[in-house]
Image (spheres, rainbow, N blue to C red):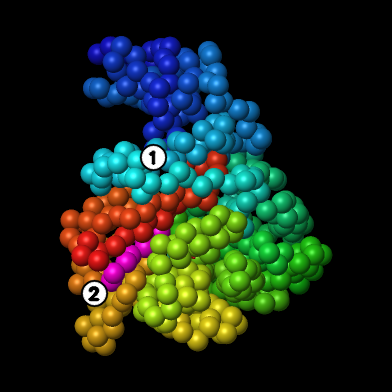
Amino acid sequence: MIVNKNDEVIIDIEDMGSDGEGIGKYQGYTIFVKNAIIGDKIKAKLMKTKKSYGYGRLMEVIEPSPYRVTPKCPIAGKCGGCSIQHLDYEKQLEYKQNKVKNCLERIGGFPVEEFCKENIMEPIIGMKEPFYYRNKAQFPVGVNKEGKVAIGFYAGRTHSIIDTSHCYIQAPVNDEILQRVRKFIEEYEISVYNEEKQEGLIRHILTRVGFTTGEIMVCLIINGNNLPYKEQFIASLCEISHMTSISININKEKTNVILGDKVKTLWGKPYITDNIGDIKYQISPLSFYQVNPIQTKVLYETALSYADLHGEETVWDLYCGIGTISLFLAQKAKQVYGVEIVPQAIDDAKKNAEINHITNAEFFVGAAEEILPQKYKEDSICADVIVVDPPRKGCEESLLDTIIQMAPKRMVYVSCDPGTLARDLKYLCKKDYEISKIQAVDQFGHSVHVECVVGMQRKDT
Ligand SMILES: C[S@@+](CC[C@H](N)C(=O)[O-])C[C@H]1O[C@@H](n2cnc3c(N)ncnc32)[C@H](O)[C@@H]1O
């Protein structure tokens, strides 16, 4: 072995991995180092060694990369959220574009350089202001080593809570919400959740803010059926202007899943509203809603342009959430069908169609891989365009098979995981489809995540 555990080595960081870790070589031996960035010369201590690669801890930045910046947030290196805040934002964008390219090339086997030359793959669209962009936060609540209440974020890859009172990517009103919830817990001696013992009441605080309306939602996730001193809790939160919805969510399960199935509204409306473009949306605690409203508009407009609608098309929007993309598409299509697995999201979707006076959108609850084949076989429903926007794990192969059988002229694939995107595109392109456009959009500044929209067409059209 060239190196052993606990050895300290000096290396140049030449690349960055999919989790934002720096990658360098010591005499041909590859070392991955968290918090190191491309262009750094560093000293790393080997913590884990395998035959041809190992993991090092950053001990010292000997010569900082020209792309290294001082993070605004003091806990940026520790908190699991902003793992690349110390990388200049323009370089973050380049890193994300390369991440998409690598996945398309390595997993999908696509000729990415050709895609770039032929303008099939466009440069990534970044944010104008990559701070304070998120409309949703989920703060874990627990006890720290000193036995005090901790509210903040999990440290990367752990469940230990880093106490915080300000987050540089969240809506600033969260500071006041956290302060008031913390005071409430301390003043009324409300217990907080202990994951190991499965005891204690308050588990998480979920907040949402409508960026165009200013409306605020606070939902406390609790390990119980009721919140004691709820009148005092409501009174305190209602002092925050634009407070719109206060609720509890019941989660008594031993699980990492944050939200339980049941929500009780304590005060105000069971939802908040927000606008994207000309469409107004109602959003309830359990529903998915894109976290970056400014970039979401860019994302949806791109999806709409790839769908290339002229008013005569039947469109399916699979994994439709609260009908966000469906209602965007409905403005230009003859008929839109949305499918989503969360019943509360479909209730929101139906309501959203109603409040926007959209009558050509219909929604179904269920798994896309079950509903689509069922509707296709039993009701002979067809599709001119199919849009999919799955969670990170991508689409089931059986769903892709049904789509291929239905033979829509165009497809639009919206994805938050370039790896599963590349896998699914490869499957579709082996059959009847080819890629016509790829656009990455940065929805998650300072994290390693990236969103993509891909336009596809049938090879015979
Ligand atoms: C990335 S979100 C997209 C939502 C929506 N298109 C939007 O932009 O707001 C994925 C959605 O798929 C839903 N979902 C997850 N698995 C599903 C499945 N098998 N069938 C249908 N919907 C599913 C989730 O509840 C979530 O709302």
Amino acid type, label 2 = Met
Say if the magenta span includes residue 339: no
- Whether 363 is drawn above or below 44: the answer is below
Residue beneath the point at 25% across and 66% down = 461
Residue beneath the point at 68% across and 53% down = 171
Q: Nearer the viewer, residue 152 or 452?
A: 452
In the image, the residue with mark 1 has its CB under 8 Å from the nearest atom of ligand 1 = no
Please report the bounds of the magenta region as a residue range. 408-414
Say the numbered circle drawn on residue 99. 1
Q: Residues within 10 Å of mark 2 (few under 14, many from 20)?
A: many
Q: Nearer the viewer, residue 36 or 304?
A: 304
In the image, the residue with mark 2 has its CB under 8 Å from the nearest atom of ligand 1 = no
Considering every residue shown, the one lying at the far left of the view is 431
Left or right: residue 162 compared with residue 9: right
Location of residue 54 in the rendering, given as x and y in whole percent from the top left corner: 33, 24
Q: Nearer the viewer, mark 2 or mark 1?
A: 2
Say the numbered circle drawn on residue 406. 2
Earlier sequence position, callout 2 versus callout 1? 1
